[in-house]
Amino acid sequence: MFNSLPGFREFYPDDCARRNFLFDTFRRVAHRFGFKEYDAPVLEPLDLYIEKSGEEIVGQLFNFTDRGEREVALRPELTPSLARLVGAKASSLAMPVKWFNIGEHYRYERPQKGRLRAFYQFNGDILGEPGPTADAELIALLVEILRELGLTDKDFRIRLSDRNLWFIYLEGLGFEESKATEILGIIDKSEKISAEKACSLYEEALGEQAESIASKVDAMKDIKNLCALRELVANENITDDARAKLDSRLEDWTTLNNYLEALGVSSFIQVDLGIVRGLAYYTGFVFEAFENEGQFRALAGGGRYNNLVKKLGGPEMAAAGFAIGDVTLTDCLSRRNLLPDTTPTPDITAILGGEDERLAALHDLAELRRADFSIVYPLKNQSINKQFKNADKSGASIALIYGEEELAAGKVRIRNLATREETLASRSQLVEELKALL
């Protein structure tokens, strides 16, 4: 017998029902926020991902040369495809673009808890709006999805940070962009490595400045609210130009904070400048959703990526977005018993007598299905007793009983499977009768 490949999952009906519960929630909430669904190929040119993330991404991909001698890869994420799609039709699209997608993605890496080689993601993005209103809308969408799934502010926080703020701050301390990027890379790794390893990376990157800069970085990372951030900036010994830029950026923070409060999600927000999102294409506000326990992977993450559309061949365009992975989210919901237990059950099951009763029933059941009732019936002849036992196990609310006498009278017997109460209904009025009952 063949087994599935490492890092890939089967979805038996119960598992598929739980997965579809997530997908239905994603779609329902995204539509409330005015987002439109789109899709893109799962197979893309390899260069699309190299251009976005660099050559080092190749080792993380399922990539190969196809029969047309093209270098291709299964998509590890959707943002490059989105940037390509929007960039190609930017002149004809109404701005801002508010799109979402639910799809499968693939990464060739070692499977481990919370991370598989094949996984589903919800992606929500806004393109064409440079102001903090778009960032606030995305964060509110993320919060509302998690709330809709049953999570509360006791379960998760949105950790909010700002790469622009970091770059301005580090520029004020005398670092050029390339060195600032290197420092941000260390900050991104610091939660995943030991303090000794982090010190070693700072020493390697900064030499004699390592200790003083690491101390300043730690002070920034300790900030947990906007007031403390303003105070640190006011007291820091940085260049006048950097101070003016920081003051301007803090006004963006104030605007974002005001919108988050107006949207009713401020109780979920935690300022956390230790979040910098390791991917270099992020350009502004960044955020991640974490469980409050702090012992599991991020539930979601995203931020600004204003340069990506142009980098991939389109026009200059502001952009921001986030992704929710299904693996860690399913683990989180499962531990809290927030996932449905089983597959959906039918509304109605049918109890059939002989062949004449079966044919009459099938005629009625076809009409009921067109009226949007979910119905099951035995596909092969069974005893009446066995059919009743199966009806009780089916999860249906109603059993329609087709017997010889009922059929001769143009009737069908309706049994409430919970109370065992029965009524007779005309076959010609069956749809109306059942709509009144269900």
Image (cartoon, rainbow, N blue to C red):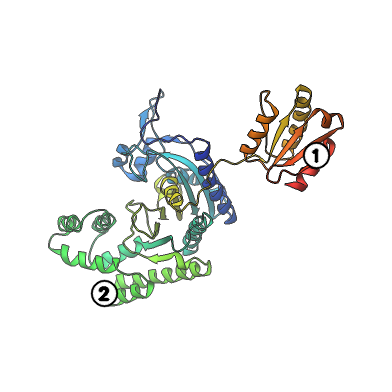
Q: Nearer the viewer, mark 2 or mark 1?
A: 1
Q: Which residue is mark 2?
A: 236
From the top left corner, tell me how far across and down residue 186 is, in percent: 24, 56
Q: 369 or 303: which is nearer to us?
A: 369
Q: Residue furthest left?
A: 208
Work out whether residue 188 or residue 402 is closer to the camera in this orientation and state it: 402
Of the pair 394 and 169, the residue shown nearer to us: 394
Against 309, is 267 above or below? below
Which corner quadrant holds the N terminus?
A: top left
Q: Residue 387, how many percent across, how many down?
A: 67, 31
317 relative to 425, above or below: below
> Which quadrant would residue 230 be assigned to in this image?
bottom left
The amino acid type, in three-letter code, at marker 1 is: Leu
Residue 49 percent location from the top left of the image = 37, 41
The residue depicted at 40 percent of the width and 35 percent of the height is 8
Q: Residue at x 79, y 23 (%)?
A: 356
**How packed is label 2: few (under 14 Cα within 10 Å), some, or many (20 or more)?**
few
Q: Is residue 275 above or below residue 311?
A: below
Side of 107 relative to 409 (left or right): left
Instruction: List the residue tagged with mark 1.
Output: 430
Tag 2, which secondary structure?
Answer: loop
Disc 1 residue crowd, few under 14, some 14–19, many 20+, Cα 10 Å: many
Q: Please tell me whether residue 224 is drawn above or below residue 144 in the rendered image.
A: below
Q: Horizontal and vertical percent for residue 282?
A: 37, 54
1 and 6: which is toward the camera: 1
Q: Secondary structure at mark 1?
A: helix
Label 2 vs 1, first from the N-terminus:
2
Q: Amino acid at mark 2?
A: Glu
Judge whether residue 90 can be spotted in this image: no
